[in-house]
Image (cartoon, helix red, strand yellow):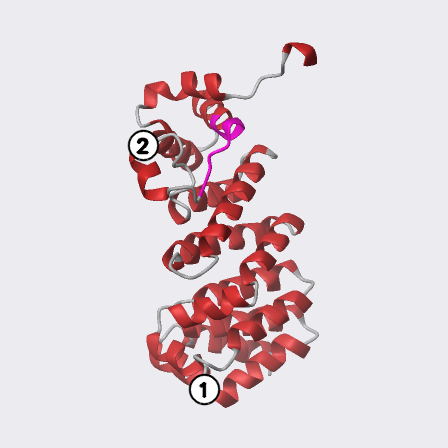
Amino acid sequence: MLYDDLTNLENLAHDREYGLKLVQKTPLKKLLGLLHYAGDTEKRQKAARIIGSSLQNNPESLGTVRGTGLIRELLTILKEESNSAVKASLIFTLSAAVAGKDEAKEFFDANGSQFLRERFGKDGVEVQGKCATFVEDVLSRHRLLSGVDEEISQWSRTFQDFLQSRPLDITSEKVLAALMYGLSLALANCNRTLKREAGDVCHTQNNFIAWLADNVVAGGHGEVMDELLREARHKVFGNPKAARKAGWELEERPTKDEL
């Protein structure tokens, strides 16, 4: 299949009728074949995007692929893929595919969330950003499934550690947004109302609270990031003026013997 043909199909895939046609058995098999075997990176990326765009917000397309094992196959392809751009597109496709309860159960039963967390820790910013978007879009919608609350807790810790480990950038924005909105319970420990809703699912680390307070005070991270930080501060502390004081008091300090 020529590159120009794939580009045209990617544009058509956003249309619900064409999207439905593209996930029928024969065309879907051809697209998956490209993902498995095409030597050209851009062709593999296009194939992933076509499938994802065909499924995204398209109930008829999702119904067509339900029960076909598509999610497990996409995970297998993702595990075999070495190119970051293709990986990112495959994660987008998974996000579009894991829409309903049945698809989510297939994803979690296949340890898909654990695998994405491994990739988040090992791959670069392109994959990390897509993982954060996946978590924000998918996990909180499926808390009734067994094991999802534990995954939310694991992602919460992973995201808090990530944000503290590097300079703030566009990927940090996606991670903080996922922590706040997708894992909206992750900042629950310091707010009584949220804590009643969250129970023991997520824990806000003391060092993350101090990091958050320090970065709100420092500012200068860009308009979007500064606004996210202020929103996160409000979720944690309730009273924005309490942020710096609470962060300082809760920050872990060395003992006298360690000084």
Mark 1 = which residue?
24
Q: Nearer the viewer, mark 2 or mark 1?
A: 2
**Magenta region includes residue 60:** no
Q: What residue type is labelled 2?
A: Arg
Vertical arrangement, residue 250 with respect to residue 131, above or below: above
Residue 169 shows in this picture: yes
Q: Which amino acid does label 1 sit on?
A: Gln
Quadrant where the N terminus lies?
bottom right
Where is the C terminus found, in terms of image quarters?
top right
Magenta-colored stretch includes residue 208 = yes
Q: Position of residue 133 (x, y in %)?
A: 47, 53
Q: Where is residue 197 in the image (x, y as percent from the top left)?
A: 32, 43
Kindly identify the residue that appears in the image at 69 percent across and 14 percent down: 258
Q: Quadrant of residue 98?
A: bottom left
Give the SS element for disc 1: loop
User: In the depicted view, which residue is nearer to us: 131 or 227?
Assistant: 131
- The answer to whether residue 97 of the structure is visible from this angle is no
Q: Report x, y in % for residue 90.
A: 55, 66
Identify residue for label 2.
192
Vertically, is 226 above or below 172?
A: above
| Residue at the spot 44% in from the left edge and 46% down from the top edge | 178
Q: Residue 56, position in %: x, y?
A: 40, 69
Whole-angstrom CA distance, mark 2 to mark 1, is 49 Å
Q: Which residue is drawn at 33% across and 19% down?
A: 241
Pick the residue in front: 211 or 20: 211
Element carrying mark 2: helix
Q: Which region of the structure is painted magenta?
A: 202-209
